[in-house]
Image (cartoon, grey):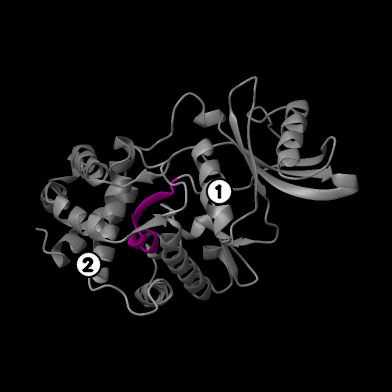
Amino acid sequence: MNFSLLPNLQTLTVGLTSVLRSGGFTTDRVTILRRQLNAYATTFPSEIVTCRVDGGSELRLFCKYAGGRGRGHSHSAHGHRGGVAYEAAVYGHLLQPSRASTPTFYGSHIDASTGVTWLILEHLDDTLRVSHTPEPAASMNVAARWIGRFHGTAEEHFPSAPIAFLNRYDAEYYMGWARRTSLFADRWHQRFPCLRTLCERFEELVVLLLKAQPALIHGEYYTSNILFRDGVVYPVDWESAALAAGEIDLASLTEGWPVEIVRQCEHEYQRSRWPDGSPDGFVTTLAAARVYLHLRWLGDRPESTAAERHLWRLEELRSASERLSVI
Protein backbone atom coordinates (compact mmCIF):
# COMPACT_ATOMS: atom_id res chain seq x y z
CA MET A 1 0.00 0.00 0.00
CA ASN A 2 1.41 3.41 -1.01
CA PHE A 3 1.29 5.82 1.91
CA SER A 4 3.83 8.26 0.47
CA LEU A 5 1.21 11.01 0.13
CA LEU A 6 -0.17 10.45 3.62
CA PRO A 7 1.19 11.50 7.05
CA ASN A 8 3.39 8.96 8.80
CA LEU A 9 2.01 6.95 11.70
CA GLN A 10 3.39 9.18 14.44
CA THR A 11 2.17 12.39 12.80
CA LEU A 12 -1.25 10.85 12.19
CA THR A 13 -1.52 9.66 15.80
CA VAL A 14 -0.65 13.09 17.21
CA GLY A 15 -3.00 14.88 14.79
CA LEU A 16 -5.99 12.64 15.39
CA THR A 17 -5.47 12.77 19.16
CA SER A 18 -5.60 16.56 18.99
CA VAL A 19 -8.72 16.62 16.81
CA LEU A 20 -10.67 14.12 18.89
CA ARG A 21 -9.77 15.78 22.19
CA SER A 22 -11.07 19.07 20.82
CA GLY A 23 -14.24 17.24 19.81
CA GLY A 24 -14.96 16.01 23.31
CA PHE A 25 -13.16 12.66 23.49
CA THR A 26 -11.17 12.09 26.68
CA THR A 27 -8.54 9.79 25.24
CA ASP A 28 -4.92 10.51 26.18
CA ARG A 29 -3.67 9.07 22.94
CA VAL A 30 -5.37 7.59 19.88
CA THR A 31 -4.16 4.13 18.91
CA ILE A 32 -4.14 3.52 15.16
CA LEU A 33 -5.31 -0.02 14.40
CA ARG A 34 -5.68 -0.02 10.61
CA ARG A 35 -5.15 2.32 7.67
CA GLN A 36 -6.77 1.77 4.28
CA LEU A 37 -6.49 3.98 1.20
CA ASN A 38 -9.81 5.38 0.03
CA ALA A 39 -11.15 3.19 -2.77
CA TYR A 40 -12.70 6.17 -4.55
CA ALA A 41 -10.20 8.39 -6.31
CA THR A 42 -10.26 12.06 -5.28
CA THR A 43 -8.08 15.03 -6.10
CA PHE A 44 -6.62 14.99 -2.62
CA PRO A 45 -5.17 11.90 -0.89
CA SER A 46 -7.54 10.28 1.58
CA GLU A 47 -7.76 7.17 3.74
CA ILE A 48 -9.98 5.30 6.18
CA VAL A 49 -8.42 5.03 9.61
CA THR A 50 -9.62 2.62 12.31
CA CYS A 51 -8.48 3.71 15.75
CA ARG A 52 -9.05 2.98 19.41
CA VAL A 53 -10.26 5.79 21.68
CA ASP A 54 -11.75 6.33 25.14
CA GLY A 55 -11.07 3.09 26.95
CA GLY A 56 -11.06 0.75 24.00
CA SER A 57 -13.95 1.73 21.71
CA GLU A 58 -13.17 1.69 17.99
CA LEU A 59 -13.77 4.62 15.68
CA ARG A 60 -13.62 4.62 11.88
CA LEU A 61 -12.56 7.91 10.37
CA PHE A 62 -12.36 9.32 6.85
CA CYS A 63 -9.26 11.51 6.58
CA LYS A 64 -8.61 13.82 3.64
CA TYR A 65 -5.36 15.76 3.25
CA ALA A 66 -4.64 18.92 1.25
CA GLY A 67 -1.41 17.44 -0.08
CA GLY A 68 -0.35 15.22 -2.96
CA ARG A 69 -1.80 16.47 -6.22
CA GLY A 70 -3.42 19.32 -4.31
CA ARG A 71 -0.10 20.60 -2.91
CA GLY A 72 1.45 23.57 -4.65
CA HIS A 73 -1.69 24.76 -6.43
CA SER A 74 -5.18 25.76 -5.39
CA HIS A 75 -7.15 23.25 -7.45
CA SER A 76 -9.73 26.04 -7.59
CA ALA A 77 -11.10 25.27 -11.08
CA HIS A 78 -11.46 28.98 -11.82
CA GLY A 79 -13.07 29.65 -8.45
CA HIS A 80 -15.36 26.63 -8.49
CA ARG A 81 -13.64 24.61 -5.75
CA GLY A 82 -12.33 25.71 -2.40
CA GLY A 83 -10.02 22.92 -1.24
CA VAL A 84 -9.82 20.93 1.98
CA ALA A 85 -9.73 23.87 4.42
CA TYR A 86 -12.78 25.38 2.72
CA GLU A 87 -14.64 22.07 2.85
CA ALA A 88 -13.84 21.78 6.56
CA ALA A 89 -15.35 25.23 7.13
CA VAL A 90 -18.50 24.17 5.25
CA TYR A 91 -18.85 21.12 7.49
CA GLY A 92 -18.08 22.95 10.70
CA HIS A 93 -20.10 26.14 10.19
CA LEU A 94 -23.01 24.97 8.06
CA LEU A 95 -23.55 21.23 7.69
CA GLN A 96 -23.10 20.11 11.28
CA PRO A 97 -25.40 22.80 12.73
CA SER A 98 -28.04 22.01 10.08
CA ARG A 99 -28.37 18.42 11.40
CA ALA A 100 -28.66 17.24 7.80
CA SER A 101 -27.68 13.63 7.08
CA THR A 102 -24.01 14.15 6.31
CA PRO A 103 -21.01 12.35 7.84
CA THR A 104 -20.19 13.53 11.36
CA PHE A 105 -17.55 16.26 11.30
CA TYR A 106 -14.90 15.56 13.94
CA GLY A 107 -12.76 18.53 13.06
CA SER A 108 -9.83 19.76 11.03
CA HIS A 109 -6.11 19.86 11.74
CA ILE A 110 -3.12 21.71 10.32
CA ASP A 111 0.08 19.68 10.25
CA ALA A 112 2.65 21.97 11.90
CA SER A 113 5.55 20.54 9.88
CA THR A 114 3.96 20.84 6.42
CA GLY A 115 1.12 23.35 6.78
CA VAL A 116 -1.23 20.80 5.20
CA THR A 117 -4.87 20.89 6.35
CA TRP A 118 -6.62 17.65 7.29
CA LEU A 119 -10.38 17.06 7.19
CA ILE A 120 -11.57 14.40 9.66
CA LEU A 121 -15.04 12.89 9.17
CA GLU A 122 -17.00 9.84 10.22
CA HIS A 123 -16.47 6.97 7.81
CA LEU A 124 -19.86 5.63 6.77
CA ASP A 125 -19.71 1.86 6.48
CA ASP A 126 -21.94 -0.22 4.19
CA THR A 127 -22.94 2.61 1.89
CA LEU A 128 -23.31 2.65 -1.88
CA ARG A 129 -23.09 5.48 -4.35
CA VAL A 130 -26.62 6.37 -5.42
CA SER A 131 -25.91 5.32 -9.01
CA HIS A 132 -24.81 1.85 -7.80
CA THR A 133 -27.84 1.03 -5.65
CA PRO A 134 -30.13 -1.85 -6.71
CA GLU A 135 -32.88 0.66 -7.57
CA PRO A 136 -31.13 3.87 -8.65
CA ALA A 137 -34.36 5.59 -9.72
CA ALA A 138 -35.81 5.25 -6.22
CA SER A 139 -32.52 6.31 -4.63
CA MET A 140 -32.37 9.38 -6.86
CA ASN A 141 -35.86 10.38 -5.77
CA VAL A 142 -34.60 10.29 -2.17
CA ALA A 143 -31.60 12.39 -3.19
CA ALA A 144 -33.87 14.90 -4.98
CA ARG A 145 -36.06 15.23 -1.90
CA TRP A 146 -32.98 15.63 0.31
CA ILE A 147 -31.47 18.47 -1.69
CA GLY A 148 -34.81 20.21 -2.16
CA ARG A 149 -35.47 20.12 1.58
CA PHE A 150 -31.88 21.20 2.30
CA HIS A 151 -32.15 24.20 -0.03
CA GLY A 152 -35.45 25.22 1.52
CA THR A 153 -34.36 24.95 5.14
CA ALA A 154 -30.86 26.37 4.57
CA GLU A 155 -32.42 29.63 3.37
CA GLU A 156 -33.95 30.04 6.82
CA HIS A 157 -30.50 29.88 8.47
CA PHE A 158 -28.74 32.44 6.26
CA PRO A 159 -29.42 35.47 8.49
CA SER A 160 -27.66 33.87 11.49
CA ALA A 161 -25.15 31.49 9.86
CA PRO A 162 -21.54 32.65 9.30
CA ILE A 163 -21.61 32.44 5.50
CA ALA A 164 -19.26 35.28 4.57
CA PHE A 165 -16.56 32.75 3.65
CA LEU A 166 -18.77 30.99 1.09
CA ASN A 167 -18.14 31.30 -2.62
CA ARG A 168 -20.94 33.14 -4.40
CA TYR A 169 -21.71 32.68 -8.07
CA ASP A 170 -21.90 36.12 -9.67
CA ALA A 171 -22.12 37.25 -13.29
CA GLU A 172 -18.34 37.23 -13.74
CA TYR A 173 -18.11 33.67 -12.40
CA TYR A 174 -20.75 32.40 -14.84
CA MET A 175 -19.48 34.32 -17.88
CA GLY A 176 -15.95 33.05 -17.31
CA TRP A 177 -17.08 29.54 -18.20
CA ALA A 178 -18.66 30.74 -21.45
CA ARG A 179 -15.57 32.70 -22.48
CA ARG A 180 -13.23 29.80 -21.78
CA THR A 181 -15.52 27.31 -23.52
CA SER A 182 -15.56 29.44 -26.67
CA LEU A 183 -11.76 29.71 -26.54
CA PHE A 184 -11.04 26.07 -25.70
CA ALA A 185 -13.56 24.65 -28.21
CA ASP A 186 -11.81 26.09 -31.26
CA ARG A 187 -11.78 22.74 -33.07
CA TRP A 188 -15.54 22.35 -32.60
CA HIS A 189 -16.81 25.72 -33.86
CA GLN A 190 -17.13 24.60 -37.47
CA ARG A 191 -19.08 21.50 -36.46
CA PHE A 192 -21.17 23.42 -33.91
CA PRO A 193 -21.54 26.94 -35.33
CA CYS A 194 -24.15 27.76 -32.68
CA LEU A 195 -21.61 27.35 -29.87
CA ARG A 196 -19.93 30.73 -30.30
CA THR A 197 -23.31 32.48 -30.39
CA LEU A 198 -24.47 30.62 -27.29
CA CYS A 199 -21.32 31.60 -25.40
CA GLU A 200 -21.71 35.22 -26.45
CA ARG A 201 -25.37 35.31 -25.37
CA PHE A 202 -25.01 33.21 -22.24
CA GLU A 203 -25.42 36.42 -20.25
CA GLU A 204 -29.14 36.24 -21.01
CA LEU A 205 -29.30 32.93 -19.14
CA VAL A 206 -27.06 34.20 -16.36
CA VAL A 207 -29.76 36.76 -15.57
CA LEU A 208 -32.15 33.88 -14.86
CA LEU A 209 -29.65 32.19 -12.52
CA LEU A 210 -28.97 35.42 -10.63
CA LYS A 211 -32.69 36.17 -10.22
CA ALA A 212 -33.38 32.79 -8.60
CA GLN A 213 -33.59 32.59 -4.81
CA PRO A 214 -30.03 31.70 -3.70
CA ALA A 215 -29.44 28.54 -1.73
CA LEU A 216 -26.50 26.78 -0.13
CA ILE A 217 -25.68 24.41 -2.97
CA HIS A 218 -23.38 21.41 -3.05
CA GLY A 219 -21.99 22.49 -6.42
CA GLU A 220 -21.33 18.97 -7.75
CA TYR A 221 -24.41 17.09 -6.60
CA TYR A 222 -23.78 14.11 -8.84
CA THR A 223 -24.77 10.57 -7.92
CA SER A 224 -21.07 9.73 -7.45
CA ASN A 225 -20.97 12.23 -4.57
CA ILE A 226 -24.04 10.90 -2.78
CA LEU A 227 -23.83 7.87 -0.48
CA PHE A 228 -26.92 5.76 0.24
CA ARG A 229 -27.72 3.47 3.15
CA ASP A 230 -31.01 2.16 4.55
CA GLY A 231 -33.12 4.67 2.67
CA VAL A 232 -31.01 7.68 3.69
CA VAL A 233 -28.64 9.71 1.50
CA TYR A 234 -25.40 11.28 2.70
CA PRO A 235 -23.91 13.84 0.29
CA VAL A 236 -20.11 14.06 0.51
CA ASP A 237 -17.29 16.10 -1.08
CA TRP A 238 -18.52 19.62 -0.27
CA GLU A 239 -15.49 21.60 -1.47
CA SER A 240 -17.61 23.15 -4.27
CA ALA A 241 -20.33 24.41 -1.93
CA ALA A 242 -21.51 27.93 -2.75
CA LEU A 243 -24.40 30.37 -2.65
CA ALA A 244 -26.19 30.08 -5.98
CA ALA A 245 -29.37 28.93 -7.69
CA GLY A 246 -30.44 25.62 -6.16
CA GLU A 247 -31.52 24.38 -9.58
CA ILE A 248 -27.83 23.77 -10.29
CA ASP A 249 -27.78 20.87 -7.83
CA LEU A 250 -30.92 19.37 -9.36
CA ALA A 251 -29.37 19.68 -12.83
CA SER A 252 -26.24 17.89 -11.56
CA LEU A 253 -28.21 15.07 -9.97
CA THR A 254 -30.25 14.34 -13.12
CA GLU A 255 -27.58 14.90 -15.76
CA GLY A 256 -27.49 12.04 -18.26
CA TRP A 257 -30.39 10.06 -16.80
CA PRO A 258 -33.53 8.89 -18.68
CA VAL A 259 -36.34 11.40 -19.07
CA GLU A 260 -38.78 9.58 -16.80
CA ILE A 261 -36.25 9.57 -13.91
CA VAL A 262 -35.40 13.22 -14.53
CA ARG A 263 -39.04 14.30 -14.43
CA GLN A 264 -39.73 12.40 -11.22
CA CYS A 265 -36.67 13.94 -9.54
CA GLU A 266 -37.82 17.40 -10.65
CA HIS A 267 -41.21 16.74 -9.07
CA GLU A 268 -39.70 15.49 -5.81
CA TYR A 269 -37.34 18.46 -5.62
CA GLN A 270 -40.07 21.04 -6.13
CA ARG A 271 -42.39 19.39 -3.64
CA SER A 272 -39.65 19.28 -0.98
CA ARG A 273 -38.26 22.78 -1.45
CA TRP A 274 -41.53 24.60 -2.12
CA PRO A 275 -44.45 22.73 -0.48
CA ASP A 276 -46.80 25.59 -1.41
CA GLY A 277 -45.76 25.59 -5.07
CA SER A 278 -42.59 26.31 -7.01
CA PRO A 279 -41.87 29.77 -8.46
CA ASP A 280 -43.01 30.59 -11.98
CA GLY A 281 -39.47 30.71 -13.38
CA PHE A 282 -38.42 27.27 -12.16
CA VAL A 283 -38.46 25.54 -15.56
CA THR A 284 -36.39 28.18 -17.36
CA THR A 285 -33.98 28.55 -14.43
CA LEU A 286 -33.41 24.79 -14.42
CA ALA A 287 -32.77 24.87 -18.18
CA ALA A 288 -30.25 27.69 -17.68
CA ALA A 289 -28.59 25.65 -14.91
CA ARG A 290 -28.14 22.75 -17.30
CA VAL A 291 -26.47 25.02 -19.85
CA TYR A 292 -24.17 26.34 -17.13
CA LEU A 293 -23.13 22.80 -16.15
CA HIS A 294 -22.08 21.95 -19.69
CA LEU A 295 -20.06 25.17 -19.95
CA ARG A 296 -18.56 24.53 -16.51
CA TRP A 297 -17.00 21.27 -17.71
CA LEU A 298 -16.18 22.46 -21.22
CA GLY A 299 -14.58 25.65 -19.92
CA ASP A 300 -12.31 23.99 -17.36
CA ARG A 301 -9.26 22.75 -19.28
CA PRO A 302 -8.42 23.02 -23.00
CA GLU A 303 -7.30 19.39 -23.34
CA SER A 304 -10.55 18.19 -21.83
CA THR A 305 -12.72 20.38 -24.07
CA ALA A 306 -11.01 19.07 -27.19
CA ALA A 307 -11.65 15.43 -26.24
CA GLU A 308 -14.22 13.39 -28.16
CA ARG A 309 -15.81 12.28 -24.90
CA HIS A 310 -17.31 15.76 -24.48
CA LEU A 311 -19.14 15.72 -27.81
CA TRP A 312 -22.38 14.82 -26.05
CA ARG A 313 -22.17 18.04 -24.06
CA LEU A 314 -21.87 20.05 -27.25
CA GLU A 315 -24.89 18.26 -28.68
CA GLU A 316 -26.83 19.00 -25.50
CA LEU A 317 -25.84 22.65 -25.68
CA ARG A 318 -27.10 22.88 -29.24
CA SER A 319 -30.47 21.42 -28.25
CA ALA A 320 -30.73 23.53 -25.11
CA SER A 321 -29.92 26.78 -26.88
CA GLU A 322 -32.62 26.07 -29.46
CA ARG A 323 -35.21 25.35 -26.76
CA LEU A 324 -34.28 28.52 -24.89
CA SER A 325 -34.25 30.63 -28.04
CA VAL A 326 -30.75 31.85 -27.31
CA ILE A 327 -29.69 31.42 -30.93
**SS at mark 2 in the image:** helix
Q: Residues within 10 Å of mark 2 (few under 14, many from 20)?
A: some
Observer able to see residue 44: yes
Residue topped by disc 1: 91
In this view of the protein, which residue sits in the foreground, 153 or 128?
Answer: 153
The residue tagged 2 is: 284
* Residue name at image x 73 percent, y 27 percent: 11
The image shows a total of numbered marks equal to 2
Question: Camera-side residue: 118 or 20?
Answer: 20
Image coordinates for residue 202, horizontal then vertical, percent: 16, 51
Q: Magenta stretch?
A: 240-251
Q: Are marks 1 and 2 in contact (CB under 8 Å)?
A: no
* Image quadrant containing the N terminus: top right
- Would you say residue 245 sits in the magenta stretch? yes
- Residue at 41% across, 54% down: 159
Q: In the orientation shown, which residue stands out farthest toward the top?
A: 113
Relative to 1, 256 lies left or right: left
Mark 1 and mark 2: Cα distance apart in space: 31 Å
Q: Which amino acid is tagged 1?
A: Tyr
Counting other residues with Cα less than 10 Å from the Cα at mark 1, is it few (<14), some (14-19), or many (20 or more)? many
Q: Position of residue 84 (x, y in %)?
A: 53, 38
Q: Give residue 244's mark.
A: none
Above or below residue 60? Residue 272 is below
- Please name the residue shown 28% across and 59% down the image: 289
Would residue 296 be counted in the magenta stretch? no
Please, what secondary structure does the residue beneath circle 1 have? helix
Q: Residue furthest bottom?
A: 276
